Image (spheres, rainbow, N blue to C red):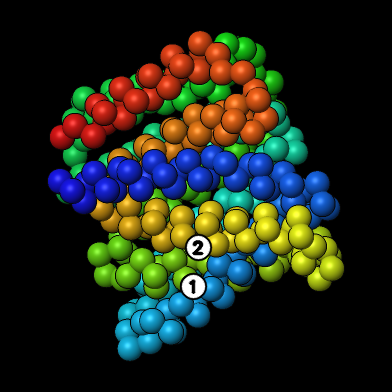
Amino acid sequence: MEKTFLGHFLAFLTVAIWGSTFVFTKMLLLHGLSPAQIFTLRFTVAYVLLLTFELVTRWQSFRLFSASWRDELVMLLLGITGGSLYFLSENAAMLYTTATNTSLIVCSCPLFAMLLVAVAYRQSERFTRVQVVGSLLACLGMAVVVLNGRFVLHLSPVGDMLAFGACLCWAVYSLLMKSVTERYSVFFITRKVFFYGLLTILPYYIVFPGFPTMEVIFSREVLWNLLFLSVVASMICFLVWNWVIHQLGAVIATNWVYFNPITTIIFAWWLLHEQITLWFLLGSLLIIVGMILSDKK
């Protein structure tokens, strides 16, 4: 019971931090860094810090490779779906479609995660009608929060497909994570996600070469924002999130993604003085009720 409560609390805290990263990412974009460069710097710093931490504190149990080539292949897929491909497709979607469309599509990934888990684990994972209704209700609440009373969507096939690709990536990431958390530590899995995320982003620079200078990277504004994104939003949050998936299961953990728009709007209200509307309160209520129902066995 205590671990379940802790899992829900840490899931909420992680999503809240991820919902705040738009401010720090925006600052880096304003200083001339591209989304791919921000991702590369984030994951590089996080990987080096995590590798150093493991070598210093866990050197007796340190391992470089998985127990089998199949598991190593899963780690590669985790790095792609939770790292390079997810971030590239989500950021690229913003170039072709609206932020509203992107948020709606990406934040609906819990529904796809539930479908994938139900198909892949038909014997061990069975969802009740109450859980399904709860997930749908939370999804509806997320849509109400994102739309905020403006029910106008601008369809863009390219942008919407890229956003759907990011959504599917995170759902697959949650499914794959469920399969390895029983056999490997969250430190090992997270380090592998960072490594393969970095490795698979390299072909991008063949097509779009260029990287910020050391002077730009170590400027005060860029460095502090980058450290938050690397240490807190990447290293710590990925470690915590992978543990949460192990504790709560892929579907219930991923359902917390519905809270992402809530934390983003609260952060915008706090820092940018944006108004909180009645639609936001209604949507938040639907998400909370839906989350409670989706956790019912």
Helix, strand or loop at label 2? It is helix
Helix, strand or loop at label 1? It is helix
- Residue 195 in percent (x, y) is at 54, 71
Disc 1 residue type (three-letter): Leu
- Which quarter shows the C terminus? top left
Disc 2 residue type (three-letter): Met
Which image quadrant is residue 189 in? bottom left
Considering depth in this image, is 191 or 236 the residue closer to the camera?
A: 236
- 22 lies above or below 189: above
Say left or right for 206 vs 237. right
Q: Say which label, 1 or 2, has the lower sequence index.
A: 1
- Residue 220 in percent (x, y) is at 76, 60
The residue drawn where x is 54% and y is 40% is: 19
| Marker disc for residue 50 | 1
- Residue 160 in percent (x, y) is at 63, 33
| Contact check, label 1 and label 2, Cβ < 8 Å | yes
Say left or right for 62 vs 280. left
Which image quadrant is residue 95 in? top right
- 15 lies above or below 281: below
Residue 63 visible at all: no
Pointer 2 residue: 235
Residue 12 visible at all: yes
Tell me the CA gap for discs 1 and 2: 7 Å
The crowd level at tag 2 (other Cα within 10 Å; few <14, some 14-19, many 20+) is many
- 293 lies above or below 84: above
- Residue 96 in percent (x, y) is at 74, 35
The crowd level at tag 1 (other Cα within 10 Å; few <14, some 14-19, many 20+) is many
